[in-house]
Image (cartoon, grey):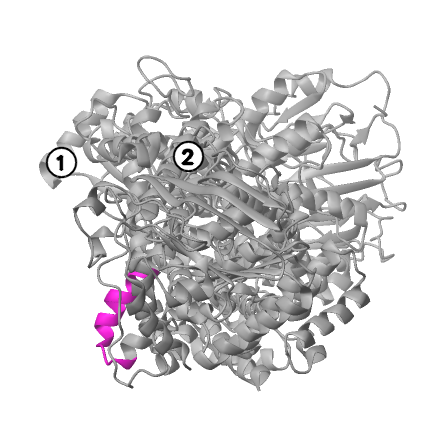
Amino acid sequence: MRRRLGIGFWLAVGWIGVVLLAALLADLLPLYRYDETLAGPPQTGPSWEHPLGTDGLGRDVLSRIVYGARVSLGVGVGAVLLGLLIGAPLGILAGYRRRAADAIIMAVNDVALAFPALVFALAVVAFAGASLRNVLIVLAVLGVPAWVRLVRGATLSFAEREFVLAARVLGTRDRRILWREIVPNVAMPAASYAFIGMAVVVVAEGSLAFLGLSVQAPTPTWGGLINEGRTLMETAPHVVLVPSVVMFLTVLSFNLVGDRLRALTDVRESGLEPVRQVTVSPMPVAEHQVRDTLLQAEDVRTHFVTPRGLVKAVDGVSFTLERGRTLAIVGESGSGKSMLIRSILGLLPGSAVRGGKVYLSGEDLTARTPAEMRSVLGPRLGTVFQDPMTALNPVRTIGTQVTEPLRVHLGLGRKEARAEAVRLLASVGIPDPVRMLGRYPHQLSGGMRQRVTIAMALSCGPDVLFADEPTTALDVTIQDQVLRLLHRLREEHHMAVVLVSHDLSVVARWADEVIVMYAGKVVERGPAAEVFRRPRMPYTQALLQAAPRLSDPVHHRLREIPGRPPDLVDLPPGCSFRPRCAYARDRCGQEAPPLVNGSGHQYACWYPRPIETAIAEGAESSGR
Amino acid sequence: MRRWKTAAALLVAATVMAACSGQRPVENPQASTARGATGPTQGGRLVYGLSADGNGFNPITDQFAVQSYSMTTPIIEPLVSVDAGGDWKPYLAESLTPNETYDEWTIKVRSGISFSDGTALTGEIVKSNLEAQKASPLTAAALAPVTAIELADPMTVRVQLRQPWVAFPYQLSAQIGMIVPPSSLADPKAASLKPVGTGPFIFKEYVPDNRMVVTRNPGYWRKGLPYLDEIEFRILPDSQTRAQTLESGGIDAMGTNRDEDVTKFGALKDAYTVHRAEGMSVAEYVFLLNTAAAPLDDVRVRRALAHALDRDTIIKTLRGGLNEPADGPWSKDSEWYVDGGYPGYDLAKATALVQEVEAAKGPIRFETISTPDPNTMQLVELCQDMWRKAGIEVSIRQADQADLINRALTGDFRATVWTSFSAADPDGEYNALHQAFSRPLGEISLNPTRLKDKELSDALDAGRITPDEAARKEAYATVQRRLRDQMPILFIDHLNTGSVIAKSKVRGIGEHTLPDGEKGRPLTGSPIPYHPFAQVWVTER
Amino acid sequence: MIILHRLVRLVVVLLVVTFLSYALLNLLPGDPVTQILGMSATEESREQLRRELGLDQPLVVRYLDWLGGLLTGDFGESYITRMSVGAELAERLPVTLELLIAAEIVALGLAVPLGVAAARRAGRGLDQALTALSFALLSTPVFVLGVLLILIFAVTWNVLPATGWTSLSVDLGWNLTSVILPAVTLGCGQLAVYARLLRTDLIATLQEDYIVLARARGLSPRRIMWRHALRPSAISLITAIGLNMGALIGGTVIIETLFGLPGIGRLIVDSIFSRDYLTVQGGVVLISVGYVVVNFAVDVVYAAVDPRIRRA
């Protein structure tokens, strides 16, 4: 835990602790009274008697800082919390309920935002007097409209998400949806704004002091201390410097702690954690021969150093691929197939460690720098990703996106690039391609978008096309069209295709060769027809059975592979599939099976399935 | 904001005007040494930093604060001026003569003077001006004793008074006596924005809250003046950045009341000259105490408050040791000053008085009002702590100027910071101290402390009607004694940090002669003083 | 239709805001008469002036009167300076607008590259340094920053004027030099907020599939950052700009005081203190309209930045 949070976190926690303790225990500490004038000579720097010096009235600066912490933290935290307490429910209500509630709340909000803050601040202070409570109320109320807007915006975006819509459709009670689905998600942006907000509030209190609207003198506040001290900036700079630095350290600490805590609770890769620079010696690469083939992967490994331990996402995968052929890589999610693709393309996140070699026409790609890699990506290696909804940039037109590689890599002019784009779009079967250029992704259907991404991948005439689950997110009827298209394009462009899927039955028809991956390793490989007809590894067999078929009865229970995908940090000894394998015996738990060679059809299993049973299954599914 | 910074200044300005045949202020030594061997030269431009904008430049309708005087006096001139000795001297007037009983004044207007719009200055115009002032709600109270204004001949105006008023001419040395042409009287709104007068400069440009530019009046009636071709007044409300602007060369001179500036620029003798206000023209920094409301209706409490304040320490801490402690409305170098009787710093006495009162009436607690600017707040906080040490619990309420004046007028306060008493003649404080102007709580009272003291009021009356110098001095001595005895006002110090700081190339600030050859009063008003510009000049350097 | 809807909304906001501020202001102790006459006038004089100024009328009558004038484009006249409020606002608006625009240029001009640099190296030294810088800027009040900047650039180096204002119509060069320091002072606080917002959004965007795919197409990191990632990450930033602009118009008072700029913020605050009701009302109208206009502009920018929003 300690290592994960980092020294900065603990320093920050320590500082906040010190400040909070000092604020709470101010009365017990051996300090001068904060309003004791002439406790020492005015405007003197730090000394033993006055560790932070004295201010213009000879008051002890340390004491004023400590007592000021009470007020400033109180105002800062209080105003933010109060603003949240009022603003967040209103924002959630407006964002979730929409319609009338939204209209009313936002109209009031508009009025509040358009209302001059100073008139309000002055009125409150003039009526109720300058006191801590009133200043807090003023600052909190002034912050509310911003909170409402922020929370409403976040709520709106989540209220549209699938999980919330699903819950609403299922008739879950609103309160439950709000608490379970909305609040946790909205909390994150709110928390991040809260720390900025706190700093802003503490400084705003100082600005009110500048305008003469702050707490009742001589109560010290950090902002007020800075305002008092600024006239002494040239003669006694410590009077303004000390509160500024204390305030800076405090808001910085709050932000740091908040950031780290959020990163901890965030299930997604937040990207906010500092990347720990791991020094791992380069992984040894097995002896191999560079072959005269289009694409050769040799012992590719991708490891991640995570807080929980080493994750071997890809663990020694080798294959070769010739022009005009399709290699299918199959496995469950998390089996490492997508990572394999990214590893080959050199598109791994910063925290990954890569091993092994990749050769394109005999040239070592792994030796290339990212910049050198870019001349290959696009012109020689094309890529299509799983989800066409997220694969296109939502804010750029199809035209800009399709022409971009043409212009960057091929150096085409604007006109030529457009003409080429039209041709490309037409070639992937998009009707009216000229009009398509001016449209945005959100205006297209999923199938159309996937055709666009394919067109983009093909734009520079690549030698190898990587298609990472190109059909998974699509309608069943569209799936086949897209696969057919890929096949046709392979023929036309005379390229090689790497087709990644979790569904063996989907790709079997279009692939020449199949690699089945499990827990980062190849567990079975061979000619597609062979593997499809005669799977030997129980996992491959299970994958085949798990695939839904059109021939299934309507209410047919979905077949699943029993058990859970393995935890890559904590792989079982021996065969990784053993815990889920119906045919496992003692030996499977002791020794990992090697990939055995049998006339081009390899499999890693001590007890491979007999050939006959598989034929029946396969024959049935291929008959569509 | 400009209104806070000068909160008190405005209050002062309204009553600045009455005169004093005060002790001649000591001439500033720095100013005189800075004077070069060569005489004044013609030409040049001066950029002059001011702390606040004026709220209009029409002397009849707009209340003039010190900065208003700085910007307006180069254009509009008064009938009367005050000389370096503190005596009134005719300016646009050729002479002012009272009758034997001092209840009629004859004003003879100087001939051969024209306004910059070409109109010649006549008795008729002076009469219309005074009538307009008499009718204006702004100045009506000050001119209350005036019963009639008549034209005796084309160049002579006669003013009839309800009672003898020996100090009347001093009233005409400021706003009330500033004469504008008939066009301005006819269109007061235009006159608020574009002042026209007989002065050495002509209005050129005004951008509110930013600057006002005036250029040389080629037809000015005082031959050979002014020296400068142009003056730009730059309005820079923040005192700190104003000083920085002077340092960076953005302005040539500025008014300030920060002791830091006086100390800092005063040390740089080669580069800057510092001109400080002194004598009667210096205002006093005070707390007004509401004598009509508990607990300050008890004179023992008022005296305890005074005993608790260590004025020397206050001056050392907050005025850079530059000011003199005050024990009355007039400073020691004034001819009106008498010594003795002020309850000075004596913590033991203060504590004893507090205990005595508390034994009878319970704890002493009250609220004091302060303007919210940091300088004032610092002073009030220091006083608050001194009072705490004597056992008096004082809380501080910040109020903006409108709120503060409103509370002072209606008596909705216990104590409040204030600056006052910069009138040239003691008679200028008449309204603010006289019991006739004291009204019950809730009513508008021009005497904010609401002290009803017959002896004090009689002395004020005597000072107003007696032409005899010695008798007047005796009367104002009584005023000082009664104030020190009754303590409606806590005096802190004479605000002579108010000063004008100029680059040494700027000459002649505070050095000027009046039309009849007397030396004029150098710097007037507070907290930041103003001065005439006709005889200011710049050297090539 | 949308325009009409907006206009109706503007009118409603204006009515509510102006009435509330008018009522609040009138409830404050003291009135313009206190300010004009100070301590020197008697109760009779005060009553007389109050009648002359129409302040003896009931509050609602005065408000409706003002509203009626507003419909004919008449903002009324300042009680204190006797100037036409419309003219006064017109004179000061360009100052504040220029200050705001310059400050936003400074803030955005620095925040975008800094946010991009921080997001690109999230968690590394540069990012952490920028985080520290943002919070340092956030914890430095403008009245300290302004004085510091003047000390450095005007007093010590003497390269920029410390204070003062030259109108754009008088001299462009002087105008620009006089706006630099105030704009930088005002922009620095915004800069910190903007850079933080942009960084957070960029980090999220950089994990999107389309960014990975853009890399798979061999596009340079620079191109990906500026052409692909920046625009979809700008929504929070634009929202913040919109929210701030409205509030800033009245909030520039400290900057205008420090630097001696004749702007709207100072006018409004001074007018509040002098109880110059009608001038304040004029400022309130300006801020409300400004807020609504800026937010309309923000919506337009939204649509330009993110085509998905155009649907709505």
Residue C75 as seen in the image, left or right of residue A73: right
Chain letter of mark 1 equals B
Identified by mark 2, the residue type is Arg
Chain letter of mark 2 equals A
- Asked whether residue B17 is in view, the answer is no
Among the 4 quarters of the image, the one containing residue B226: top right
Residue C146's spot in the image, x, y percent? Answer: 57, 38
Label 1 vs label 2: CA separation?
70 Å
Task: Look at 33% across and 65% down and name the residue there.
Answer: A543
Mark 1 lies on a secondary structure that is helix
Among the 4 quarters of the image, the one containing residue A452: bottom right
Pick the residue in front: C32 or A212.
A212
Residue C105 as seen in the image, left or right of residue A60: right
Task: Look at 25% across and 84% down and name the residue there.
Answer: A555
Check the image and report above or below for B121 versus A255.
below
Residue B257's spot in the image, x, y percent? Answer: 55, 32
User: For the residue carrying disc 1, how many other residues have a C-alpha within 10 Å: few (<14), some (14-19), or many (20+)?
Assistant: some
Query: Residue at label 2?
Result: A276
Residue A562 in magenta?
no
Mark 2 lies on a secondary structure that is loop
Query: Residue at label 1?
Result: B358
Residue A573's spot in the image, x, y percent? Answer: 24, 42
Task: Look at 44% across and 57% down and name the residue there.
Answer: A526
Identified by mark 1, the residue type is Glu
User: Residue most toward the top?
Assistant: A48
Give the mark toward the camera: 1 or 2. 2
User: For the residue carrying disc 2, how many other residues have a C-alpha within 10 Å: few (<14), some (14-19), or many (20+)?
Assistant: some
Magenta extent: A169-185
Callout 1 and callout 2 share a chain: no
